[in-house]
Image (cartoon, rainbow, N blue to C red):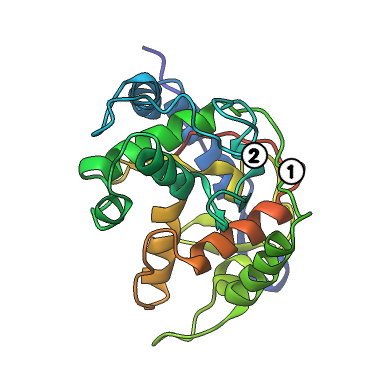
């Protein structure tokens, strides 16, 4: 086995600050690239596809008639247009909340019971697997969230306000970490989500497999963890604030190429 040793050169920058010739971001990117070839997210993709086609629930039917915004049963390209307004539910919905709606209306599951289930357990684990497969079907496609409906525009503005709202014991906002260029935490670059951060970064990178805890994380879980780090109460699954934040980040990511499912530390 050939081992490659990465070396770094310490350079004295202006003001005596130590700078590294090879950035940490490049090192992390190479680490992810090595792991991507065996990304465990593929197992969740397989499970999600099987769940989509399987006759389940009290009604014993599949989800193949589920309308994700591009017509009943159309999966490819749906992920990069969500969240969006759905006339049948009269609500703004992201991918996960739309899946739950279809599980209730088509298969007969109780949506209230599903959303009370912890992430990674029971039917909520199935929602994550379904979201992973559906999102993967749009891999390489570019985000283009609709803003034609008044609710879609309203939720963008609500998401923007929530993104910059400071609070909690640490007086944090989403913008504290993701509101400017060239920020970093724990040796990891933080994308600026107030604009298009680039292909496969930020909103265009979730769902993702977290190596550190061996779990598949959806965008809803990612946002919940951000609220935890802000020391805010955990939001309810698919609450308006999480949908609004998804709209804000998704619209800002217009033109970015989806890379999901990705792999994270």
* Along the viewing direction, whichever of 36 and 173 lies nearer the viewer: 173
In percent of width and height, residue 189 lies at 57, 55
Residue 185: where, in percent of width, then height?
Answer: 49, 63
Residue assigned mark 1: 144
N-term mark: 1 or 2: 2
Is residue 257 found left or right of 125 in the rendered image? Answer: right
Question: Is residue 141 visible from the viewing direction of this image?
Answer: yes
Q: Secondary structure at mark 2?
A: helix
| Residues tagged 1 and 2 counted as in contact (Cβ below 8 A) | yes
Q: Where 126 falls versus 160 (above or below)?
A: above
The answer to whether residue 119 is above or below residue 109 is: below
Residue at the spot x=28%, y=50% of the render? 114
For the residue pair 42 and 181, the one nearer the viewer reads as 42
Q: Is residue 239 above or below residue 64?
A: below
x then y, percent, for residue 226: 43, 65
Q: Quadrant of residue 71?
A: top right
Residue at 68% from the left image edge and 63% from the top image edge:
151
The residue carrying mark 2 is 80
Q: Residue furthest left?
A: 122
Q: Residues within 10 Å of mark 1 (few under 14, many from 20)?
A: some
């Amino acid at each position: 086995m050939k081992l490659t040793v990465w070396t770094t050169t310490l350079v004295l920058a202006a003001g005596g600050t130590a700078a590294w010739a090879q950035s940490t971001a490049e090192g992390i990117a190479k680490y992810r690239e090595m792991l991507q070839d065996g990304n465990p997210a593929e197992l969740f993709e397989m499970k999600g596809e099987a769940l989509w086609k399987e006759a389940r629930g009290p009604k014993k039917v599949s989800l193949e008639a589920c309308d994700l915004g591009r017509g009943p049963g159309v999966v490819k390209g749906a992920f990069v247009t969500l969240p969006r307004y759905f006339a049948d539910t009269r609500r703004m919905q992201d991918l996960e909340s739309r899946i739950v709606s279809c599980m209730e209306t088509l298969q007969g599951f109780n949506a209230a019971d599903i959303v009370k289930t912890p992430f990674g357990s029971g039917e909520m684990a199935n929602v994550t697997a379904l979201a992973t497969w559906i999102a993967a079907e749009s891999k390489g496609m570019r985000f283009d969230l609709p803003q034609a409906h008044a609710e879609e525009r309203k939720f963008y503005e609500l998401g923007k306000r929530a993104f910059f709202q400071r609070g909690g014991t640490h007086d944090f906002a989403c913008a504290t970490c993701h509101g400017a260029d060239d920020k970093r935490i724990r040796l990891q670059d933080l994308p600026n989500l107030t604009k298009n951060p680039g292909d496969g970064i930020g909103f265009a990178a979730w769902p993702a497999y977290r190596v550190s805890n061996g779990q598949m994380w959806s965008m809803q879980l990612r946002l919940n963890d951000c609220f935890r780090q802000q020391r805010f109460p955990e939001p309810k699954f698919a609450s308006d604030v999480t949908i609004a934040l998804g709209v804000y980040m998704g619209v800002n990511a217009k033109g970015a190429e989806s890379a999901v499912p990705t792999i994270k530390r």
